Amino acid sequence: MKVSIKLTILFVFYLQIGSTQPLSEKLFKNFELYKEQSFKNKRFKQKDILPLIDKKRNANFKVTEVGKSFEKRPIFELTYGTGPIRIMLWSQMHGDEATATMALFDIFNFLNASGDEFDQFRKELKAKTTIYFIPMLNPDGTELYQRRTIQEIDMNRDALRLACPESKILKELQQKYCPDFAFNLHDQSPRILVGNSNKQSTLSFLASAYDQKKSINGTRKRAMQVIALMNKEIQKFIPGQISKYSDEHEPRAFGDNIQKWESSLILIESGGYRDDIDKMFIRKLNFVAMLTAFESMYKASYKKVNIADYNSIPQNNYSCYDILIKNVTIDIEGQKYTVDLGVNKTEVLNDEKSTNVYIRANIMDVGDLSIFKGLQEWDAKGATLVDDFGNGKEIRVGQIANLKFSQNKRIVKVLENGMLK
């Protein structure tokens, strides 16, 4: 009898521990249950998401065509919940920035699920918020996997002139709903570091400035507080790999203007993570960050956050190469000198119809690169750049970086297809 009582008490104790575990940790742990499996890489097109959108026409989501792109592709909005707190999100304003689109469909799967430990969360979210999702705002650009629209316009610099039909759609929806919170979802270069560290910026946040003075009113303060809360939670999974995007005011940008139009604007930029070219891990972080933010909004827990926590997030640092080779000797017909080599990798499609890519590395700079850092670094002191015959080799900026390095007449390092080995 005593053993049974002890087991019961122990079971209740573990249940209490589970119930007090932060939402972010539960979401991170259970992500695979909700992950949209059809995304195998980041180079998908609108035709790949249309069947997924159609499947969401159910009791949980209202699906509406809100307009068409320049090339007449439909743009859809998915609405979840009926509560008073209004949240609006859009992804792939830039056609080659697909991470958040994948994460949104992961969120759709999560919100459609039931019978798990998140049922209470969904119930409260649905009752207390109305969320407007616009996945893939730039389907024409996505078709070509390019940043700009088919009109060759950067949509994020079109908030005032509204030359793109997609820009008009976004502004009209923001003006129609007047959301309390808005999420501007992007991808940034994987070559960005966190502050003065050597750590890659996996996520970058920003509460966009609505004027040149970078003033802080109630609208922008709310965005800062939510970001500080997301930062605290996501740091658990990528410690030291979150930075803050530059808050220089850009009067043409949607983020800055939506902040001015009194929706608390939260920018999320998905950067790089080691061995995650297709950003499958980073989409998971997006999933956790956004759902954690939603909880803070309907519980108003973000209001307890001090904006000093936002200001303490390190700035983005752009002084980085994919590979930095230091102190290599160049020998041109007996004339020797020492330089650093900055090398960047590029994804190249195998063919226009394929989504498969190969990696090509190019030399971006030669000389004194001591102010730069590399995601991968090698000090080549004592080594000489050589060609296939062991002789000295000239170097040119822009050339493909398939390189060999020798020391004491022995090859000690090879850079081939972006791999330093």
Image (cartoon, grey):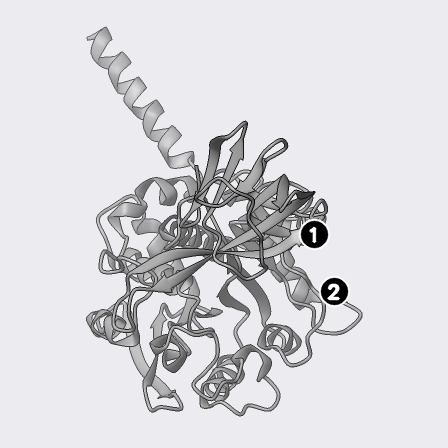
Going from the N terminus, do you reach mark 1 or mark 2 first? 2
Q: Which secondary structure lies at badge 2?
A: loop
| Residue 325: quarter of image | top right
Which quadrant is home to the N terminus? top left
Q: Residue at x 35, y 52 (%)?
A: 280
- Which mark is on residue 216? 2
Q: Residue at x 37, y 59 (%)?
A: 103
Examine the rendered structure and indicate whether residue 176 appears above or below residue 405: below
Examine the rendered structure and indicate whether residue 274 appears above or below residue 77: above
Around disc 2, counting alpha carbons within 10 Å, would you say few (fewer than 14), some (14 to 19), or many (20 or more)?
some
Q: Where residue 343 appears, x then y in whole percent? A: 54, 52
Examine the rendered structure and indicate whether residue 26 appears above or below residue 354: above
Q: Is residue 377 visible?
A: no
- Which mark is on residue 52? none
Amino acid type at mark 1: Ile
Q: Nearer the viewer, residue 125 or 282?
A: 282
Amino acid type at mark 2: Ile
Q: Residue furthest top?
A: 2
Q: Which residue is under mark 1?
A: 307
Q: Nearer the viewer, residue 340 or 287?
A: 340
| Residue 218: quarter of image | bottom right
Answer left or right for 370 relative to 41: right
